[in-house]
Amino acid sequence: MIKIENDKRRYFDKNGIEIKEGDKIILSEGGKPLEVYLCADGQLGLDATNPAWIKSGRAEPCEYGLYPLTLEDTQYAVVVGNTSATENG
Protein backbone atom coordinates (compact mmCIF):
# COMPACT_ATOMS: atom_id res chain seq x y z
CA MET A 1 0.00 0.00 0.00
CA ILE A 2 1.16 3.53 -0.73
CA LYS A 3 -0.40 6.38 1.23
CA ILE A 4 0.10 10.06 0.46
CA GLU A 5 0.08 12.30 3.52
CA ASN A 6 1.05 15.98 3.37
CA ASP A 7 2.37 15.44 -0.19
CA LYS A 8 4.73 12.71 1.07
CA ARG A 9 4.48 9.03 0.13
CA ARG A 10 4.43 6.37 2.86
CA TYR A 11 4.93 2.76 1.81
CA PHE A 12 3.63 -0.34 3.62
CA ASP A 13 4.26 -4.03 3.02
CA LYS A 14 1.52 -6.64 2.72
CA ASN A 15 1.40 -6.95 6.54
CA GLY A 16 0.96 -3.21 7.15
CA ILE A 17 4.58 -2.62 8.22
CA GLU A 18 5.94 0.70 7.00
CA ILE A 19 8.79 0.43 4.48
CA LYS A 20 11.55 3.00 4.95
CA GLU A 21 14.84 3.93 3.34
CA GLY A 22 17.51 1.37 4.29
CA ASP A 23 15.03 -1.42 5.04
CA LYS A 24 15.33 -4.82 3.42
CA ILE A 25 12.29 -6.31 1.72
CA ILE A 26 11.49 -9.61 0.04
CA LEU A 27 9.15 -9.46 -2.96
CA SER A 28 8.45 -13.18 -3.35
CA GLU A 29 8.48 -16.31 -1.23
CA GLY A 30 12.06 -17.59 -1.12
CA GLY A 31 13.34 -14.35 -2.66
CA LYS A 32 16.49 -12.55 -1.63
CA PRO A 33 16.28 -9.48 0.63
CA LEU A 34 16.57 -6.25 -1.38
CA GLU A 35 17.67 -2.93 0.11
CA VAL A 36 15.27 -0.01 -0.21
CA TYR A 37 16.72 3.33 -1.34
CA LEU A 38 15.34 6.86 -1.40
CA CYS A 39 15.02 8.16 -4.98
CA ALA A 40 15.83 11.77 -5.83
CA ASP A 41 12.11 12.53 -6.29
CA GLY A 42 11.20 11.28 -2.81
CA GLN A 43 9.93 7.85 -3.85
CA LEU A 44 11.37 4.64 -2.44
CA GLY A 45 13.01 2.28 -4.88
CA LEU A 46 15.18 -0.77 -5.52
CA ASP A 47 18.65 -0.89 -7.10
CA ALA A 48 18.49 -1.40 -10.89
CA THR A 49 22.16 -2.40 -11.17
CA ASN A 50 22.98 -6.02 -12.03
CA PRO A 51 23.96 -7.69 -8.71
CA ALA A 52 26.64 -9.77 -10.48
CA TRP A 53 28.30 -6.58 -11.71
CA ILE A 54 28.34 -5.17 -8.19
CA LYS A 55 29.83 -8.39 -6.80
CA SER A 56 32.53 -8.47 -9.50
CA GLY A 57 33.41 -4.79 -9.01
CA ARG A 58 32.25 -3.81 -12.49
CA ALA A 59 29.63 -1.43 -11.04
CA GLU A 60 28.66 0.27 -7.80
CA PRO A 61 25.25 -0.14 -6.11
CA CYS A 62 22.66 2.13 -7.76
CA GLU A 63 25.09 3.07 -10.55
CA TYR A 64 22.45 2.18 -13.14
CA GLY A 65 19.60 3.84 -11.29
CA LEU A 66 16.66 2.79 -9.16
CA TYR A 67 13.34 1.15 -9.90
CA PRO A 68 10.66 3.01 -7.92
CA LEU A 69 8.50 0.77 -5.69
CA THR A 70 5.07 0.33 -7.21
CA LEU A 71 1.72 -0.34 -5.62
CA GLU A 72 1.98 -3.91 -6.94
CA ASP A 73 5.43 -4.33 -5.31
CA THR A 74 4.02 -3.31 -1.94
CA GLN A 75 1.20 -5.88 -2.24
CA TYR A 76 3.83 -8.66 -2.29
CA ALA A 77 6.60 -7.09 -0.21
CA VAL A 78 7.55 -8.29 3.26
CA VAL A 79 9.88 -6.17 5.41
CA VAL A 80 12.69 -8.22 6.98
CA GLY A 81 15.29 -7.31 9.60
CA ASN A 82 14.74 -3.59 10.13
CA THR A 83 14.04 -1.09 12.86
CA SER A 84 10.59 -0.13 11.53
CA ALA A 85 9.29 -3.74 11.81
CA THR A 86 7.59 -2.93 15.12
CA GLU A 87 5.58 -0.02 13.68
CA ASN A 88 2.18 -0.35 12.06
CA GLY A 89 0.56 2.09 9.64
Image (cartoon, rainbow, N blue to C red):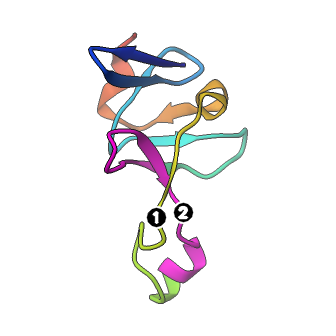
> Residue 16 location, x and y as percent?
50, 14
Amino acid type of the residue tagged 1 in the rendering:
Gly
Residue closest to the eye, 59 or 17: 59
Q: Is residue 5 left or right of residue 26?
A: left
> Residue 81 location, x and y as percent?
41, 38
Which label was assigned to residue 65? 1
Residue wearing tag 2:
48
Q: How many marks?
A: 2
Tell me the residue at 26%/14% (across/down).
6
> Residue 52 location, x and y as percent?
59, 78
Sequence-wise, which precedes: disc 1 or disc 2? 2
| Distance in Å between CA atoms under marks 1 and 2 | 5 Å
- Say if 84 sits above or below 26 in the image: above
Quick one: quadrant of the N terminus?
top right
In contact (CB < 8 Å): disc 1 and disc 2: yes
| Circle 1 SS class | loop
Tell me the quarter of the picture where residue 75 sits: top right
| Circle 2 SS class | loop
> Residue 60 location, x and y as percent?
40, 77
Give the residues drawn in magenta, as a range.
Answer: 35-54
Tell me the quarter of the picture where residue 72 sits: top right
Tell me the residue at 48%/36% (across/down).
80
Around disc 1, counting alpha carbons within 10 Å, would you say few (fewer than 14), some (14 to 19), or many (20 or more)? few
